[in-house]
């Protein structure tokens, strides 16, 4: 399975944008990029996913590099409720549907 | 609507005992997943059901772990002869189809069952 690399932790100030990076240099041409996050004491929740083009939804934006070897999850205005562990996951086309989680990035948001 | 629910929320047992963990998926979701999360780690895949059948059980660590989904809805994860190393949060997730158009469908997770083996 292709792997992802994320920083262990990041800090942000409330109401400022946050850019969470993910490296996936061994990504295949048909692998989707998924982001999930896990708030304290809860199960993970879906954030966003994409293949090649940048994606936007009500929660976040996903910027995908032209060579697809990296991507960035963008929270436009961080709130205290965004403090969580953020997981970048590659979805191989040969996948049976399971998610392979790494260590993720722990985001701290300061008031 | 109701999300994924898991019972019990906490389970404390003694080494060597048998435990059952229950998952109620979102109504109508055909795919159901079990994951295990140790402290400080990301969730680790255990097993995936499509309907009543196990489509992928490659994550089950050994034959002490078994899961069923007899009617294609509720699932039970069963652990025999529990060991201290089995202590973790066991997460269940469901999704509408599992795979949709060649990509993994969005998975909806429950709050987990925290298992402690003394």
Image (cartoon, rainbow, N blue to C red):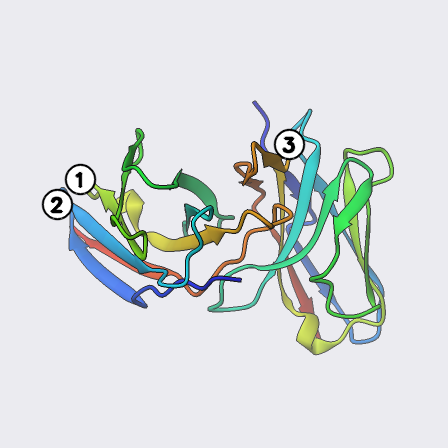
Please state the horizontal and vertical placement of residue B77, each as a whole percent of the image: 77, 53
Q: Nearer the viewer, mark 1 or mark 3?
A: 3
Numbered mark located on residue B97 in the image: 3
Left or right of B8 on screen, residue A20: left
- Please name the residue that numbered disc 1 is placed on: A77
Do discs 1 and 2 belong to a common subunit?
Answer: yes
**Are there few (<14), some (14-19), or many (20+) residues within 10 Å of tag 2?**
few
Q: Secondary structure at mark 1?
A: loop
* Residue in front for this viewpoint, B43 or B12: B43
Front residue of this view, candidates B10 and B1: B1
Tell me where residue B43 appears, x and y as whole percent.
Answer: 54, 59
Dot 1 or dot 2, earlier in sequence: 2
Does label 2 lie on the same chain as label 3? no
Q: Which residue is mark 2?
A: A16
Camera-near label (3 vs 2) is 3
> Is residue A79 something one can see in this rendering?
no
Image point (70%, 77%), residue name: B84
Find residue A40 and name its label. none
In three-dimensional space, the C-alpha distance between marks 1 and 3, rounded to whole angstroms, equals: 33 Å
């Amino acid at each position: 399975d292709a792997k992802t690399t994320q920083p262990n932790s990041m800090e942000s100030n409330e109401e400022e944008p946050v850019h969470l990076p993910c490296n996936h240099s061994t990504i295949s041409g048909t692998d989707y990029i998924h982001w999930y996050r896990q708030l304290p004491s809860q199960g993970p929740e879906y954030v966003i996913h994409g293949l090649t083009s940048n994606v936007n939804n009500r929660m976040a934006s996903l910027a995908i590099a032209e060579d697809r070897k990296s991507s960035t999850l963008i929270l436009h205005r961080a709130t205290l409720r965004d403090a969580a562990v953020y997981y970048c996951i590659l979805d191989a086309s040969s996948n049976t549907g399971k998610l392979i989680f790494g260590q993720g990035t722990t985001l701290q948001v300061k008031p | 609507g109701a999300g994924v629910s898991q019972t019990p929320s906490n389970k404390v047992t003694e080494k060597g005992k048998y435990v059952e963990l229950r998952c109620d998926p979102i109504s109508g979701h055909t795919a159901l997943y079990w994951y295990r999360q140790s402290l400080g780690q990301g969730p680790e895949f255990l097993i995936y059901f499509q309907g009543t059948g196990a489509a992928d059980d490659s994550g089950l660590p050994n034959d002490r772990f078994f899961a069923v989904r007899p009617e294609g809805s509720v699932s039970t994860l069963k652990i025999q002869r529990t060991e201290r190393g089995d202590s973790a949060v066991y997460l269940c997730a469901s999704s509408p189809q599992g795979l949709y158009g060649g990509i993994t469908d969005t998975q909806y997770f429950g709050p987990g069952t925290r298992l402690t083996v003394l």
